[in-house]
Image: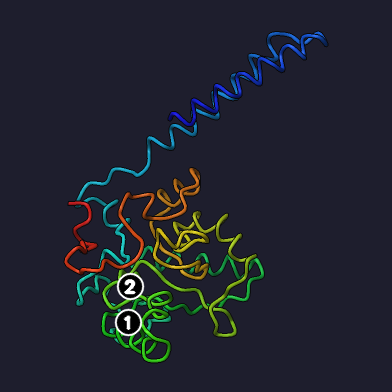
Amino acid sequence: MKKGLGILAALLIIAAGGYVALNQHSATKQDIKKTVSKVKQSVSRETSAQKKYPIKIKTGTEAAKLLIVVNKKHPLPSDYNPYNGAVTGNNPDGGGLMTAANEAKSKLILAMQQAGFPIASNVSSFRYYSYQQSLYNGYVTQHGQSWADKYSARPGYSEHQSGMAFDLVGEDGDLPTSTTMYNWLKNHAYKYGLIIRYPKGKASITGYDQEQWHLRYIGVKYATEMHKWGVATLEEFTGISGGDYNSDKSADVSALDEYK
């Protein structure tokens, strides 16, 4: 708030100085009043956003269900599979996703295809603990643990196991990395209740570098709020801690216990 008031004070000084100059050219006091009013409205929007986030979430509510945060500090139980996804493979047909998330996925992909993006209808959606473990171990064997931790979640720490996230896949079978697609998703994904879970420049908060192909369902209401106020990450939106893994796993908090 102090920052906002500082901006207001500076702009008022500029406005006052402008008034002296404008007055020499027969400007009216009404011109200055309009300028000051616009500045006050801008600062009001900024301070309102600062007061509103992170949002308050009560345990057991729909918000707590939609805004569960799975990251490197908040794992899921090894047997977590709330939407009955297949425990082998990556459920390319959207199996294992919350019904609303699966519907949002299909609508988004159709919109992207109509917009000319070469996106396949299949995705990489729910991943069971043991499947994620095999993926992660494969990366460790091939590239080492340090590399693996940058690009793949350890078993139990993967958002894919939540049943609310999925990876887009290009028609060529690869993960799509187009900057044009990234910008399109930033401006359209929220309409379907989806967010880019790992946006550019937020690795210190999310724990992962930019992944424009990894989308997360949080519902249209919350996705729209994040878009409206320019909140880039789910951690910032909810106030749940993120970043890298805890050195001691005993410091982890289960994703299921975040809002208790």
Task: Looking at the picture, tell me which residue is in the foreground, 52 or 84.
Answer: 52
Q: Quadrant of residue 38?
A: top right
User: For this view, does 140 lie left or right of residue 202?
Assistant: left
Q: Residue at x 33, y 43 (%)?
A: 55
Q: CA gap, disc 2 to disc 1?
A: 7 Å
Give the colour scheme shown.
rainbow
Tag 1: residue type? Answer: Gln
Could you tell me residue 147's position as x and y percent?
Answer: 42, 80
Could you tell me residue 26's position as x and y percent?
Answer: 81, 8
Q: Is residue 62 above or below residue 5?
A: below
Task: Looking at the picture, tell me which residue is in the foreground, 241 or 178.
Answer: 241
User: For this view, does 181 lie left or right of residue 220?
Assistant: right
Q: Residue at x 49, y 55 (%)?
A: 190
Q: Earlier in the sequence, mark 2 or mark 1?
A: 1
Q: Which residue is mark 1?
A: 132
Q: Which residue is mark 2?
A: 158
Could you tell me residue 239's position as x and y percent?
Answer: 32, 49
